[in-house]
Amino acid sequence: EVQLVESGGGLVQPGGSLRLSCEGSGFTISNYWMGWVRQAPGKGLEWVADIKQDGSEKQYVDSVKGRSTISRDNAKNSLYLQMNSLRDEDTAVYYCARDGSSLRAFDIWGQGTMVTVSS
Amino acid sequence: EIVLTQSPATLSLSPGERATLSCRASQSVSSHLAWYQQKPGQAPRLFIYGASNRATGIPARFSGSGSGTDFTLTISSLEPEDFAVYYCHQRSSWPLTFGGGTKVEIK
C-alpha cells in the first residue's frame, strides 16, 4: 500500500524548534517532488514547502522562509521539515504529500502531525 | 502570488441535487489546477487534477472544467458521502496556493 506517515509533532514554546519527519512506503520517494502542507485549527490548507527529487531545488512560502528547512533522505525514503523560531501562528496540522509528477497535484497525503506552539 | 478565490463559501443542498463549485484565479494558471475533498479529521484527498481529470477511484459524478482563471467542480447528483469541504489548488507557479474552500453541507 502506498502511504506516507508523519511524526515529530508536539507542543513547543514560542521561539523553539521542531523537526518533522515523513516516511514513505509502497513507493520510492526519489522519483517525486515532495512537499509539506499545513492546516491551522478550523482553517484552510496552506502550502509550506516543496523539494525536488534530488534535493537540488527547494521552495518555501514566505511566512516560513529563513525559519524552516525542507530536506530529504532518499535512502531512507524519508522527508523532513526543520522548523525554527516557531511562532503561535505556526500551530497547525502538518501534512506531507507526494507531488504526483505529471499530475501536478498532491496525489498521496499522510495523516498529519499536530504542532502546537504555546507557552 | 496567485490568489484562488472559491465561491460560495458554503453550499447547502440535498442528496440528489447538483452542486456547482467555483474557483477563480487572480492570474492564469493554465490547466494546472487541482481539486481536493476533505472530511473532518481526515487528510485531503485528490479528486481532480489538470482541471478536468478525475483521480484514481473518483466517481464519474464528479467533473472539473475550466482553464486560465475560471474553474468549476461539478457534482452531478450528491451522494451522502459527498458532503465535505472542497479546496482548489494551483501548481502553475511558486508559491503554490490553495483556495479558501467550499463547504458542501446537507440542507
Image: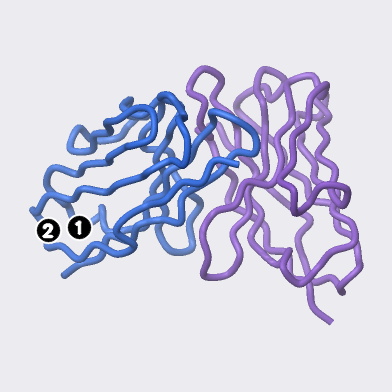
Chain colours: A purple, B blue
Measuring 76% from the left and 60% from the top, which residue is drawn there?
A9
Q: Which mark is residue B80?
A: 1
Measuring 81% from the left and 29% from the top, which residue is drawn there?
A76
Chain-order first, disc 1 or disc 2: 2
Label 2 marks which chain's residue?
B
Say what amino acid the circle numbered 2 marks: Pro
Measuring 42% from the left and 44% from the top, which residue is drawn there?
B88
Q: Is residue A10 above or below residue A73?
A: below
Under circle 2, the secondary element is: loop
Which residue matches tag 2?
Answer: B15
Is disc 2 surrounded by few (<14), some (14 to 19) or many (20+) residues within 10 Å? Answer: some
Is label 1 on the same chain as label 2? yes
Measuring 40% from the left and 24% from the top, which residue is drawn there?
B31
Report x, y in % for residue A91.
70, 67
Q: Is residue B72 above or below residue B51?
A: below
Report x, y in % for residue B20.
20, 48
Report x, y in % for residue B76.
13, 42
Is disc 1 surrounded by few (<14), some (14 to 19) or many (20+) residues within 10 Å? Answer: few
Label 1 marks which chain's residue?
B
Q: Quadrant of residue B80?
A: bottom left
Asked if the residue at tag 2 contacts the one at tag 1, i.e. Cβ–Cβ closer than 8 Å, the answer is yes
Query: Depth check: A34 or A46 in front?
Result: A46
Say what amino acid the circle numbered 1 marks: Pro
Q: Which mark is residue A6?
A: none
